[in-house]
Amino acid sequence: IAVLGILKKVGAPKSLETKITGESLFNDGVGVVIFLVLSQIAFDQADPDAGKIAFLFLEEAGGGLLFGLALGAVGYWLLRQVDNYAVEVLITLAMVTGGYALAMTLHLSGPLAVVVAGLMIGNRGRRDAMSDATRANLDTFWELVDEALNAILFMLIGLELIVITFELSYVIAGLIAIPMVLAIRFLCVAVPVTIMRARQEFTPGVIKILTWGGLRGGISIALVLSLPTGPERDQLLTVTFLVVVFSILVQGLTVGRLIKASVPEAGNDGSGASAEH
């Protein structure tokens, strides 16, 4: 949300905003799945094997994607049956809360399921199953929910200061982790973008922007808090907190300048769009 607000403020191309949004959503979903797989291996008494790891990942990720398609299809059908924006807003709310809870109960990826369902409703559902009034009210409602949850998230991140152990070795590990995370992030962005550039045009400076604009937040802290209590958890929590705070305060406050310096269209009224799709 913070990065998207900055993109709108500096007038970045819509295509860049779409890439950052989509990549962020799927990163969160896949990241949670990988964490769950690794944590099950770490705390399972049985020896892990390739088949078990593949099955766990396929169950969480693949099952979540398929469940999201089914959830989106049901939501789309329900939205087509009514023409009342209040009811339609409640349908989308039920999809998010109920769909996520059901996916987690079935040991599927809730984040991936809701992202896929949201893509279906946000594209085909908006086009074929909603009136102009519904679209306007739906956007207003979910923008408000986003802003409210984002404010609560930042408050909770601040409250984490009360329980975090700031030992010198933990802080040093966190300071080492910051450039490591950025370097890995750069590689994960640069490799696929470089490959896809042969067939698709990208916004100038997209690798730098996606690398520096990949902020860490509540999911990272929530996952490390889910680990069993112990000294390892305390160290990981401190390291994670430092990485998250750096990304929000340093990267978040400077990504706007990077976009202005890298993208020629930035700084206008935001209507400029690149040739990419």
Image: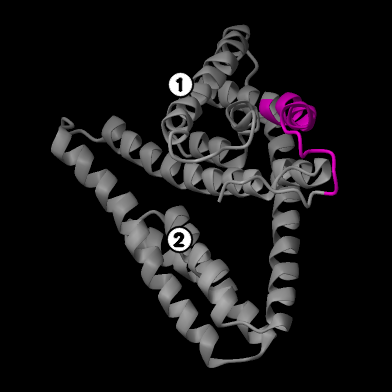
Is 259 inside the magenta-drawn segment? yes
Q: Mark 2 points at which residue?
A: 116
- The residue at 61%/49% (across/down) is 18
Q: Label 1, secondary structure: give it.
A: helix
Left/right of residue 180 with respect to residue 264 in the rendered view: left
Q: Position of residue 80 (x, y in %)?
A: 52, 87
Position of residue 268 measured from the top left corner of the image (x, y, whole percent): 85, 43
Does the stretch in magenta take in 89? no
Please name the amino acid that badge 1 sits on: Glu
* Residue drawn at 74 percent across, 42 percent down: 12
The part of the image, by quadrant, that contains residue 33 is top left
Q: Which amino acid does label 2 sit on?
A: Val
Q: Is residue 203 left or right of residue 159?
A: left
The total of numbered circles placed on residues is: 2
Q: Nearer the viewer, mark 1 or mark 2?
A: 2
Asked if residue 164 can be seen in this view, the reply is: no
Which residue sits at x=53%, y=67%? Answer: 96
Within-10-Å neighbours for mark 1: few <14, some 14–19, many 20+: few
Provide the residue span drawn in magenta.
247-269
Pointer 1: what residue?
232
